[in-house]
Image: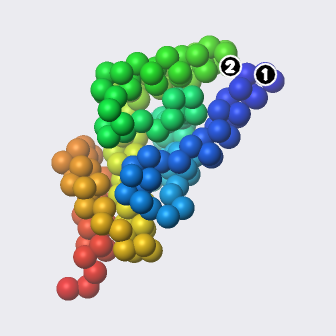
Amino acid sequence: MKSMEILLRAAGKLKTVIRSGWIRKNIKDPESVAEHSYRTALTAYLLADEGVDREKVLLMGLIHDLAEAEVGDITLHDGISPEEKETQERLAFEKLAQAAGRDDLLKLWHEYEAQNTPEALLVKDADMIEVIMQALEYEEAQGADLQEFWNNVRPNLKSPKAREFFAHLERQRMGPL
């Protein structure tokens, strides 16, 4: 029971960790990391084709940012190198998984970070698609200029289905011609 409590408290803490990129862009009432993780998991599940372990992508999507309960939502704009960010997140997740006695989750998180399986690549795409969905919603609701998010995601999507959905969202963004 203690291991369950440790993980659920960390997940609960993510409800209060606000996504830094939206703060930097002065978004009113920005989403939390928990909200982002939920839709990332659902997006990964929906992007998964035959031959991809859907249960794995769902769980990977839910835990991919769990370390942020300890280290916060670190972005490139925080003056922390990508290597230092990776180290901080890895140590935080290892500490959390060890305290909870959940080597299975640690293995899954390492797989996501390594980006060397179809499931990890798909969840990374889902993570970026979720960012774009959120950007589109903030643009529509608040008139925010979030072009940099679109520019950053476009060249990094790997799966054809994610690229196709991105193009669909771009068309939505442009409105009727």
- Can the viewer see residue 25 in this picture? yes
Residue drawn at the location 52% of the way across and 55% of the way down: 31
Colour scheme in the image? rainbow
Which sits in the foreground, 45 or 51?
Answer: 45
The local crowd at label 1, few if under 14, some if 14 to 19, many if 20 or more residues have their Cα within 10 Å, is: few
Q: Is residue 52 visible?
A: no
Q: Amino acid at mark 2?
A: Ala
Tag 1 residue? 2
Distance from disc 2 to disc 1, alpha carbons, whole Å, reads 7 Å
Q: Seen from this angle, which residue lies furthest bottom?
A: 177
Indicate the amino acid at tag 1. Lys
As drawn, 160 above or below 74: below
Seen at 45% across and 21% down, the residue is: 88
- Compared to 111, does 40 lie above or below? below
Q: Is residue 174 left or right of residue 2?
A: left
In which quarter of the view is residue 166 placed? bottom left
Q: Is residue 114 left or right of residue 98?
A: left
Q: Which residue is mark 2?
A: 100
Percent x, y of residue 14: 60, 41
- The reply to whether discs 2 and 1 touch (Cβ–Cβ < 8 Å) is yes
**Res 111 → quadrant:** top left
Q: Residue 125: which quarter of the image? A: top left
Q: Earlier in the sequence, mark 2 or mark 1?
A: 1
Percent x, y for residue 63? 54, 35
- The residue drawn where x is 34% and y is 29% is 80
